[in-house]
Amino acid sequence: MYKNFKNIEKVVFGRGSFDMMDSILAERRNDNAGFILFVVDDYFNGKELAKRIPVKDGDIVRYIDVDPNEPTTDQIDTLRDEVMAVKGMPAGVVGIGGGSIMDIAKAVSLMFTNEGSSTQYQGLNLIKKPGIYHLGVPTISGTGAEVSMTAVLTGPEKKLGLKCDWTVFNQMILDPELIASVPTDKWFYTGMDTYIHCIESENGILNNAYSHAYAEQSLKLCREIYLGENAGQTAENDDKLMVASMMGGLSLTYSEVGVCHALSYGLSKIFGEKHCYANCLAFQHLEDYYHEGVREFKQMLVKHNVVLPQGLSKSWTDEQITAMAHVAYNLHHMWNHAIGTDWKEKITIETIKQLYERM
Ligand code: NAD
Ligand code: ZN
């Protein structure tokens, strides 16, 4: 049996396309209680872009600070309950921001129609009913959260996504002008998430012609953006990065991520490291698994004067390393893809602890 994936229904791409949001929302505004909930990265509060959000009477705009914590189940439940108590069910949810805001918009749109706490639905296909209309506008590129079928949430017990067909956005607006203000360090780490998605998608048993076509194109764009003659944060490269992020996300959707993402989840869960940065911390030490990819990644580090910390594990306790190893080990699907169906014969908690000890 093959996976049967749902893609985004509608996508608009282009500089200035943000201003099409008003007309795109017009045909939705009468649904449910007839108002739109905008969830916006707090970075934009008071900025020029905030004035361009097509807010009408009755709409709700919530600015959310996404630093330092990744989205939580509590945060989603509270947002849903507050909005329902004041105004009822929105006609739609619009998310404007990075991967964190994409996940918040996706998750809350599902939780308006699914009773109880979002902790009940962390996992694959646990959501019972379709959510409400949701539209995503990424403002930093790399995670692929704009196209993925999961909304990653940290709950009291696990960091795991609400993963199902209904999680996928109905509409995406890709306006490369919006990512111009991303600080260089975040531009690098988040972009590297795309690069690592592709390397991992390509290197494993689930790679196939479909996922490969997306990864190949996304990698070509990453190389131009981060290593090419005109490497750097330019308008042309912002156009490319937005597309690379989307294609990297689609590649892994049709294949899988691998060793780096498994280790990264451990770093996020135990030390609260942000996803993209955690990937970079891990990936630099994975020559054994992704030889060429790690070599090229190191060239990108040098080219952009990014120095990643070394010797981190010296200050970690054995208990912390063991806890991370368990988080990583439990991501069976990633090891299965990266190592093969007999991965349990090759990968043990001890092997994973040794990988963390390299960091
Ligand atoms: P983010 O949303 O956490 O934002 C990172 C930082 O960039 C924040 O400080 C934010 O304020 C800032 N920022 C965003 N846009 C900006 C802009 N245009 N100008 C200036 N600053 C800007 O970043 P991210 O790396 O995109 O997302 C990380 C999150 O994505 C994590 O919570 C992770 O779990 C999640 N994620 C989800 C998926 C998925 O498929 N759903 C995949 C990977 C990661
Ligand atoms: Zn990732």
Image (cartoon, helix red, strand yellow):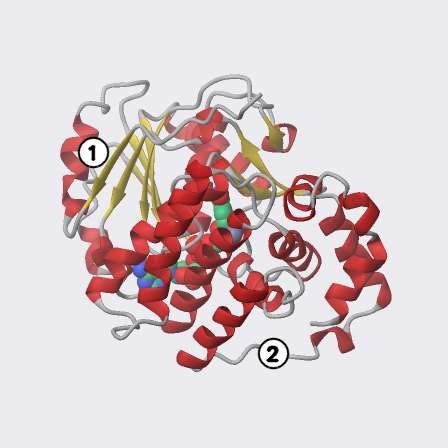
Residue 139 percent across, percent down from the top left:
32, 54
Q: Secondary structure at mark 1?
A: loop
Q: Would you name the residue on which mark 2 appears?
A: 309
- Amino acid marked by disc 1: Asp
Residue 86 percent across, percent down from the top left:
40, 29
Residue 20 horizontal side relative to residue 197, left or right: left
Which residue is drawn at the image coordinates 65% and 79% (left, top)?
310
Q: Are marks 1 and 2 in contact (CB under 8 Å)?
A: no
Where residue 226 is drawn, which disc sits there?
none
Residue 232 sits above or below residue 258 on the image: below
Residue 170 horizontal side relative to residue 257, left or right: left
Q: Would you name the residue on which mark 1 appears?
A: 57
Which residue is drawn at the image coordinates 64% and 60% (left, top)?
289
The N terminus lies in quadrant? top right
Which residue is drawn at the image coordinates 38% and 66% (left, top)?
187
- Amino acid marked by disc 2: Pro
Which tag is nearer the camera, tag 1 or tag 2?
A: 2
Q: In 3D space, how far apart are the residues under numbered discs 1 and 2 (Cα atoms)?
A: 49 Å
